Image (tube, coloured by chain):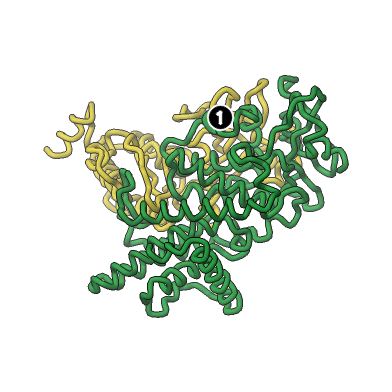
């Protein structure tokens, strides 16, 4: 496994040409871009063949072939790297979170988001509302990977946070479908729980997951070169194509995991639908929904939140939003959902604390 | 996991043998083939070539596979089974993706063509429609719109079992969803799609209705030549 450090401790060993290597049991398949591509396929093949072997260990890493004194690609090119280590880092995150939260909450509130389509999750499909929810609950387990960073030696919670922060920006820039973001993070977490990812690959992994999610969800997904530009062209298109394939293989094309947002929308719509006669309550509930949607997005950044099942986390966020807006949902319990009490209260507590932190650093939050 | 298990056991792709060409789809070629590991059982293979110069894996392939994978567990009798997904290198810089489906003898078009006059009896039509609708209902309750229902995509097995196929255009609907307007083959396209209005699950029901009529008439109900012509035919 020691070989992998060649690509990882970037500062000393800058790459000239590199390629993705999947490494079972520490053996590195070294390939350079531009060499016989047959070899690359062998890698992919051998990788697929071994996915079913739980003993094998895999890595996604960039392997450097030579030194020539160039700079190694920085992890997140849009952030100055100093933000990662100095004490200003947390501040930076909190600050940008707040700005975004206000921005997105107000966007949801005035309902002017340009959108050629149905605004809520279930428009036009009301007949199937509960069916869909039950279906999502059923398949949730398969797509849920808590503790996805447990086997990662180079990826920390902070790195994940910074990466997702960056993905949120890109997602916003390309005006992608909301759920694409949640799906991308879900795919990424699943990949992280399966294979070892080198630090300098994380950025490419994140953006490729966004691409895959976008191909799944959006009418016009961004083109590869546009996404690569966002990484300051640190990576080659060829690498992205290969990583895409690897992602698809690791996830076995199971890309339709239910997301926190889908559950949240169900809870909100359900509550709004049963209270349709009560005008004032409806308004409060809609505000709770808008507030909750804002919270949802920032819950992505917190590693501890991906320890909870999406359906549970969404429920806690809904409850917290309802509480914050001093409205009431009649102790709503989603139909057919089993809730384990200890986990539920722990999650509620975490969400409350999360909101408190927000209010602390940005008192105007309560105005939303 | 079953799939990777199978994949591990043979290094090259010698498991499936091509027999004959069935047709050309929107993004690939479909062959009839044999599964040599399973007593030469017939399969349908859809081959998709992915070139490195393109945008990676085509959207339609990603959607079709992920949808079918999600539905697999239910083993619904009216949805075509996806048996295997393979990818093999062909030329440098090109990957071939092979989707292996169960093989079904014919589609609804051929079935109707072969059917001797005076056509299908009411009981047969009732049975086919029931199967068609339960397939569609199953999709809708799993939040999927097929969006391309037409006799060519409806398969009939030799024992009269109806199966929906070709999910290249299907998609999962959800929150704040933008949908393309160019879906569904013209003759089976619902007016809201032609008029570029909002659409949802009813587009599939419209197509079902068109197919229903076709079962009786043994020819398509509304054969418009253009968008406008199709609309005029609908309102006639």
> Which quadrant does the N terminus of chain A fall into?
top right
**Residue at 46% across, 48% down:** B159
Is A244 located above or below residue A320 in the figure?
Answer: above
Q: In the rendered image of this protein, which colour is used for chain B?
A: yellow
- Camera-side residue: A280 or A187? A280
Is B106 located above or below residue B27 in the figure?
Answer: below
**Residue at 38% across, 66% down:** A288
Question: Could you tell me which secondary element the residue under label 1 belongs to?
Answer: helix
How many numbered marks, from 0 up?
A: 1
**Which residue in the structure is indicated by mark 1?**
A229
Measuring from the top left, give residue A323's x and y in whole percent. 43, 74
Measuring from the top left, give residue B216's x and y in whole percent. 25, 43
Measuring from the top left, give residue A86's x and y in whole percent. 69, 50
Q: Is residue B141 left or right of residue B38?
A: left
User: Given the current orientation, which residue lies at the most extreme left position?
Assistant: B236
**Residue at 47% across, 73% down:** A336
Is B61 located above or below residue A250 in the figure?
Answer: above
Q: Is residue B41 left or right of residue B27?
A: right
Measuring from the top left, give residue B180's x and y in whole percent. 35, 38
Q: Quadrant of residue B101?
A: top right
> Which quadrant does the C terminus of chain A fall into?
bottom left
Q: In the image, which lettered chain appears green?
A: A
User: Given the current orientation, which residue lies at the most extreme right position?
Assistant: A2
């Amino acid at each position: 496994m020691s070989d992998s450090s060649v690509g990882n401790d970037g500062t000393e060993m800058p790459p000239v040409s590199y390629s993705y290597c999947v490494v079972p049991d520490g053996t590195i398949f070294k390939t350079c871009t531009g060499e016989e591509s047959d070899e690359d396929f062998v890698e992919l093949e051998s990788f697929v063949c071994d996915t079913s072997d739980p003993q094998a260990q895999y890595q996604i890493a960039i392997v450097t072939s030579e030194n020539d004194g160039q700079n190694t690609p920085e992890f997140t090119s849009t952030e100055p790297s100093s933000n990662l280590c100095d004490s200003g880092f947390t501040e930076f995150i909190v600050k940008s979170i707040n700005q975004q939260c206000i921005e997105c909450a107000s966007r949801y509130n005035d309902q002017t988001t340009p959108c050629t389509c149905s605004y809520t999750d279930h428009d036009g499909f009301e007949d199937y509302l509960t069916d869909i929810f039950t279906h999502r609950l059923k398949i949730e387990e398969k797509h849920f990977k808590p503790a996805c960073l447990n086997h990662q030696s180079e990826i920390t919670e902070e790195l994940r946070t910074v990466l997702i922060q960056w993905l949120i920006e890109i997602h916003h820039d390309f005006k992608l479908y909301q759920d694409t973001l949640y799906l991308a993070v879900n795919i990424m977490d699943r990949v992280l729980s399966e294979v070892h990812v080198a630090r300098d690959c994380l950025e490419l992994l994140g953006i490729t997951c966004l691409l895959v999610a976008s191909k799944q969800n959006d009418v016009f997904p961004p083109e590869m070169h546009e996404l690569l530009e966002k990484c300051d062209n640190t990576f080659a298109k060829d690498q992205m194509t290969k990583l895409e394939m690897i992602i698809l293989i690791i996830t076995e094309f199971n890309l339709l995991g239910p997301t926190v947002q889908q559950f949240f929308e169900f809870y909100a719509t359900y509550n709004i639908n049963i209270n349709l006669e009560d005008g004032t309550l409806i308004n409060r509930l809609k505000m709770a929904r808008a507030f909750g949607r804002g919270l949802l997005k920032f819950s992505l950044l917190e590693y501890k939140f991906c320890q909870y099942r999406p359906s549970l986390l969404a429920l806690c966020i809904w409850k917290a939003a309802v509480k914050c807006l001093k409205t009431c949902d009649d102790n709503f319990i989603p139909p057919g959902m089993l809730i384990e009490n200890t986990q539920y209260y722990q999650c509620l507590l975490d969400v409350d604390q999360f909101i408190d932190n927000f209010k602390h650093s940005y008192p105007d939050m309560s105005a939303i | 996991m079953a799939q990777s298990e199978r994949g591990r056991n043979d290094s090259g792709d010698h498991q499936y043998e091509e027999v004959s060409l069935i047709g050309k789809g929107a993004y690939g070629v479909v062959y009839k083939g044999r599964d040599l590991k399973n007593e030469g059982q017939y399969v349908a293979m859809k081959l998709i070539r992915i070139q490195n110069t393109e945008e990676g894996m085509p959207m339609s392939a990603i959607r079709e596979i992920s949808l079918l994978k999600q539905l697999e567990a239910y083993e619904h009798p009216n949805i075509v089974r996806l048996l295997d997904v393979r990818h093999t290198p062909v030329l440098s810089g090109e990957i071939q993706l092979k989707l292996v489906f169960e093989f079904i003898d014919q589609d609804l078009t051929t079935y109707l063509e072969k059917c001797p006059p005076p056509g299908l009896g009411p009981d047969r039509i009732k049975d086919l429609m029931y199967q068609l609708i339960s397939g569609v209902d199953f999709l809708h309750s799993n939040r999927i719109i097929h969006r391309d229902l037409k006799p060519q995509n409806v398969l009939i097995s030799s024992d009269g079992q109806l199966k929906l196929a070709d999910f290249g255009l299907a998609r999962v609907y959800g929150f704040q969803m933008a949908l393309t307007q160019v879906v569904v083959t013209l003759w089976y396209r619902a007016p809201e799609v032609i008029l570029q209005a909002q659409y949802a699950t009813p587009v599939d029901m419209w197509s079902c209705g068109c197919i229903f009529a076709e079962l009786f008439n043994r020819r398509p109900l509304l054969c418009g030549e253009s968008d406008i012509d199709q609309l005029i035919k609908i309102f006639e």
